[in-house]
Structure formats: C-alpha cells, structure tokens
Image: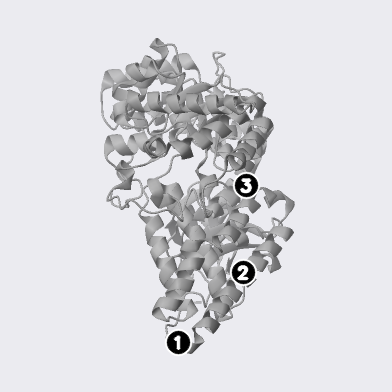
Amino acid sequence: MTENESQEIVLKGLGVAPGICIGKAYLVDKEGVNVVKKYYIAEADLHKEEIRFKSAVSRARQELAAIIQETPKELRQHTAILETHMVLLQDKLLYGQTLDTIQRFRYNAEWALKNVVDELKAMFQNMSEPYFRERGADIVHVSDRIMRNLVGGDAVNIRDIDKRVILVAKDLSPAETSQIQLERIKGLVTDGGGIASHTGIIARTLEIPAVLGLNNATQIIRNDDFIVVDGSAGLLIIHPTEQTLMEYEERAARYERHRALIARESRMPAKTLDGISIQVMGNIELPEEVVAVRDYGGNGIGLYRTEFQYLGRRGFPTENDLFDKYRDVVEVMTPRPVTIRTLDINGDKALPGQSGNGEANPVLGLRAIRYCLKKPEIFKTQLRAILRAALYGNVRIMFPMISCCEEVRQAKTLLKEAAESLAAEGIEFEYNVDVGIMVEVPSAVAIADMLADEVDFFSIGTNDLIQYALAIDRGNRYVSHMYRPLHPAIIRMIKTVVDVGHQKGIKVYMCGEMAGDPIHLPVLLGLGLDELSMNPQSIPLVKNAIRKLSIKESRAFMYRIFKDKKEGQIESFLKKAYAGVLFDLDIDEDEIAV
C-alpha cells in the first residue's frame, strides 16, 4: 500500500441513519448489469427474443418471491416494498414498453430494457418532490434484476456475507437490504440514495449507521479498507488515523450509552421544565411504520403520507385497498390521533400507466389538492376510505398545497358528497372528524385568518414552505445551501400562522423536517406550536430535548430574536443561549452518568 493509498480521506454525504460504526469495507459487486451491448435481432428471431425477456422477468419474480419468503422477522414490515417491485415487473411502462421496443426497433432485450428504463428514470428525476425522485430508484432496482438474468450475471446475496463488515455499494435495492443480517452488517455506505430512499428507511428501521449520496465512494474504497461511518454527521472516513480511530471509538461508545438512555425514557411525556406537555407525533409513508412510531413513544401520527398506495401499480387503488391500509394504522394507534394527508402527487406524471400532462414546471402545476379537485372521482374514493377508517379510531383529514379558501370549500364539498354516498349505500362511516390544511404555500400564510374560518387545524409543512418562500430548490446542488429553516422570513411566517390560528381558536401543528431537529426547538416552542411531528426515529431525541427546555425561557428567547432584527444571527444566538443543553445531545456525559 502506498502512502497516498493509506492517507486519511473524509467524504461528506447524507447521514440518513444516526450512529457510528468502525470496521472493514465490503464492496457489493454489481458488475455486469451496467455494460449493455446493443445489436439487432433478425425478424424471424423476434419471438425468441421476447421469450428470452419474459423468462428473465419470470426468474426475477421467482427470486423476489423467495426473498420475501426468507425475509427476517425484523424486516417483514418492509416486504410491501418488494411486493411493489413484483408488480413493477409487470407494469406496462416497463414490461410492456420493453416488449414493444424489441418489436418496433428489433433491439436485443438488454438494449430495449436499457432504453425504456433510461426514459422512466428521466421522468422520475424531473419530479419536484425528493420522495418521488427516490421512487425512480425502484424502477432501476427492478430492471437491474431483469438485466442480470438476461446477461447471466450472479445475483448479489447479502445474506451470504460471513464476516462483520460495512457494506459499500453504488446503491442497494430493497431486496438486497432486506437480506441484511444484523449480527454481520455494521453499517451502510452508498454512492446514491437519499433520505427518503428505501435503503435509508431500512437502515433507520434496523438502527444501523448509514451515509448515502456519497457520489464516488465505491471508486475510492477497496475491499477490507478500514473505514468509519458517522451516520449522525453524514461523514465517511477512509483509512482513519490512530487519533481519529481513538476519537470515534470513544464517541461510538458514548453514543450507544446515550441512545440506550433516551430509548428507556422515550415513553415519558415530553413535558417542559415549566410543566407544559408537548405532543410529539410521527410522520409515516407506509402503514408498517406505525409500529415504529408507537415503539419510539410517539403520541400519534401527525402526517400519514398516502401517496405510496398509488405508486408502483397498474391502476388506481380501490376504496377497499385504501380502507384496509388506513384502518390498520388507525387501529394500531387508537385512541391516539392519525392525521391522514390526502393524495399529494405531482399530477399524472407520478402515476405509472397514466398519460402525462407535459407540464414544464410540475412543482407549480397540477399537484396535490389541485390534482384531486380536477379528478373528483379519484379524490372521493380516497375520502370514502378515510371516513370508513375513521370508525376505528381518532382520524384527522388534512388537505395539502392549499393556496386559497375556494380550494378548501371545494374539498369539503367533496368530503360531504363522499359521506352522503356512503350513507346512501348503507356503509358505516364516521363524519365527525377534524379537517385541516397544510400551510406550505406563502399565500396560505398571507390569508391564514381567512383559512382559519374554514378548518379545524393548521399543520405547517416547512419543507415546501421554505422552498416556495425563499425560491430555493432543495434538490439543486447550486442553491440548496440557501435552504434555511431559520431564515427570518420563515420564522415570521410561522409566527403569523401560529398567532392567527390561536386568535381564531384552532391549533397549529408542524409536520416538516424542521420539527425533527432539536436545534429548532427553542424557536418552535417559543413561537407557540401546539404539536410537532417528525420521522419516528427522531421522536425520543426530540422528547428528551423538550424536557430540558422551558416555554417561558423559549418565549423570552424569541422576544430577543425579534427585537434584535439581525438577519442570519438566529443560529449563532441559539448556540450561545443553549450551549450544553441542545448541542452535542448525543454525547451528554451528565446524562450518561445518571
């Protein structure tokens, strides 16, 4: 090994699952599927080529079925992802178009599949929401499996790894991550992937450190290289020095002790030092995640994203499909509330099998409530399912992307029509549910007083509100650093919504990523938010932090912030005022000693 090869290298990625692990790298080899040959098929052999493609798809389906059957108990909640992949294998956009491409252009099956997948990837990558962009990865994982069967490559079998290692890969499919054996895999590192990727979701479920989105880690790391993964800071350290190793070994031990302490206290109320209880809820996108919310001590579901039931299938889900999913979540959480956000999707582009609208800027186009009001039958099917599920617990309905009062009134009219149709058919349902809106468009902030007269609650969606208010695309690497939750404009907008909501007698919640970061808690408590919702894994940490704060001091802190009027100073004020309270929470020695 040369001097350069052993030099410490630090790479910055996305910390999608917190924690620290140290160990040897294991590169997941996927060679073969990325090198695709192109050739033409003779007219007389086209039928054989179609059969060859269909056989590869059939083997892929059998492989996935076997993986689902053998999935460890702790990952069973994620087999729905693999079942979705099995549906994708027959999706007409993938399966049908590949067969059509073989016929029309006389391409070999591999090249036809590659062409179709490239088009589908581009379609997903143009979507504005990170969640939907991540779903493009599902297409790639499924096509990789078919491609491997076409070229005769060996499948990656994570389950066969027989030593304690850290996985390093360009990307990992849900099928591959579902084979992880906790006693052997310490952590994950990938070139691709993001917060909302299935790899990230599964890493958080398994509670193993993971850093994704590293771009070129697989080009730098070799098998058996010693590496450190810091999933809390999003850092990967290759060839750590002795000093670095000592520091991280100490930090890892302290982190584990602190995590154990917080976990023991996760079911304790989030009561501030001055005795005010704050409801800390969980955000979920899959029904199976409700168990994690409950296990982490969540007080309910503050945001149930319902888009997943519409993706990766040939057509729209039926009312009964949706009802079964919603009822499962409501029954597990009852009597605690479940806030079901109605379909928030970027128009037809996000629904495989539907015709596209050709929108130049879908983020400002036919999405969320606009799409639902344009497609009332699709919307009413979902509303009927929600009203039926409401019989089994405490349900709230939340409309996304509201920008004017008329949208709320139209949505409520359709909700009423859904209830009337259920009544006419003699189907049991519960109509007495709270109806609220997500405040995520600047116009909704400006007319909050008018909107408050129409609904039972506000829930501030900070992800989109920040994006729209600051004109920042979170996915654009050139400007993403300007995405600042603590920008004075954002703080003032939140204050306006909270003040107006309370003056009008309705509660104001927050369900964006801002709520899940303890650094923001003095600001959010000081502004008077009634409830915070976040990813399930953040719940214990946020509850722990709330117990260290007082509402009175938080309000005084915010008073000073508004009085000083110094843009860009809020974060430094926070660090100065709450040093030792909110910062370095994961290594608080005083708590460890308890």
Helix, strand or loop at mark 1: helix
Q: Amino acid at mark 3?
A: Thr
Number of callouts? 3
Location of mark 3 (residue): 205
User: Along the polypeptide, which appears first: circle 2 or circle 1?
Assistant: 1
Query: Foreground: 366 or 96?
Result: 96
- Closer to the N terminus: mark 3 or mark 2? 2
For mark 2, what is the residue?
60
Q: Nearer the viewer, mark 1 or mark 3?
A: 1
* Mark 2 neighbour density, 10 Å: few (under 14) some (14–19) many (20 or more): many
**Residue 581, numbered circle:** none
Question: Of helix, strand and loop, which one carries label 3?
Answer: helix
Q: In terms of depth relative to the viewer, which is nearer, 363 or 5?
A: 363
Query: Residue 534: where, in percent of width, then height?
Result: 52, 34
Give the mark nearest the N terminus, 1 or 3. 1
Which of pointers 3 and 2 indicates the residue nearer the eye?
2
Picture coordinates of residue 159, whole percent (x, y): 69, 65
- Residue 134: x and y in percent read 46, 53
In the depicted structure, whether residue 518 falls above or below residue 118:
above
The image quadrant that residue 281 belongs to is top right
Instruction: Work out whether residue 199 or residue 82 is closer to the camera in this orientation and state it.
Output: 82
What is the distance, in whole Å, between disc 1 and disc 3 at their CAs? 50 Å
Q: Quadrant of residue 282?
A: top right
State how far apart marks 3 and 2 are (Cα): 26 Å
Which residue is depicted at the point 65% across and 63% down? 64
- Image coordinates of residue 33 in percent, x first then y, are 51, 75
| Displayed quadrant of residue 215 | bottom left
User: Badge 1 is on which residue?
Assistant: 43
The reply to whether residue 593 is visible in this rendering is no
